[in-house]
Image (cartoon, helix red, strand yellow):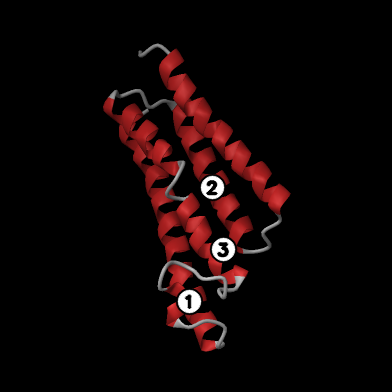
Amino acid sequence: MARDMILWPMGGLALLTFIVLTLIPVRRFRAAFAGKVTAHDFKLGESANVPPYTSLANRNYMNLLELPALFYVICLMLYVTDRVDVLSYRLAWAYVGLRALHSVIHVTFNQVFVRLAVFALSNLVLMAMWILFFVQKPY
């Protein structure tokens, strides 16, 4: 498998991150136009006056900047060492898909146990990528 294929899942996760990032101002402006918040409510982050629905996009964006950093690192390690194979490629896309599903759940109906299950599964996929990198012998 061509090693540059691993760049596609990385781009997919980056795209997801940018999509969620655009939700933040959309939801904030919607709340402001509805008279629920003012600019002052965002002066030091988000005040207690910010409606939960408005805060969800920001919280999900922060999630996409936390553990996914390890995803980008493992993908780059696979790329640099020329160890991209079908399994690592599929796991990478599985991770991106699960993170996308997590984001959809988080910023829409936000059922905690469903969100937790998807989040935990995505973390297991990420751990598997790291473990496989160190236990598989390079070709």
Q: In this view, does 123 lie above or below 137?
A: below
Q: Residue at x 52, y 26 (%)?
A: 128
Determine which residue is flagged by label 1. 41
In three-dimensional space, the C-alpha distance between marks 1 and 2, rounded to whole angstroms, equals 29 Å
Determine which residue is flagged by label 3. 56
The local secondary structure at tag 3 comes to helix
Q: In this view, does 48 lie above or below 59?
A: below
Q: Which quadrant holds residue 5?
A: top left
* Discs 3, 1 touching: Cβ within 8 Å: no
Residue 42 in view, yes or no: yes
In three-dimensional space, the C-alpha distance between marks 3 and 1, rounded to whole angstroms, equals 15 Å
| Amino acid beneath label 2 | Arg
Mark closer to the chain start, 3 or 1: 1
Residue 120 place in picture, x, y as percent: 62, 38
Q: Which residue is drawn at 67% across and 59% down?
A: 110
Mark closer to the chain start, 1 or 2: 1
Which quadrant of the rendered structure holds the N terminus? top left
Residue projecting furthest to the left = 80
| Amino acid beneath label 3 | Leu
* Discs 1, 2 touching: Cβ within 8 Å: no
Determine which residue is flagged by label 2. 99
Residue 8 place in picture, x, y as percent: 38, 44
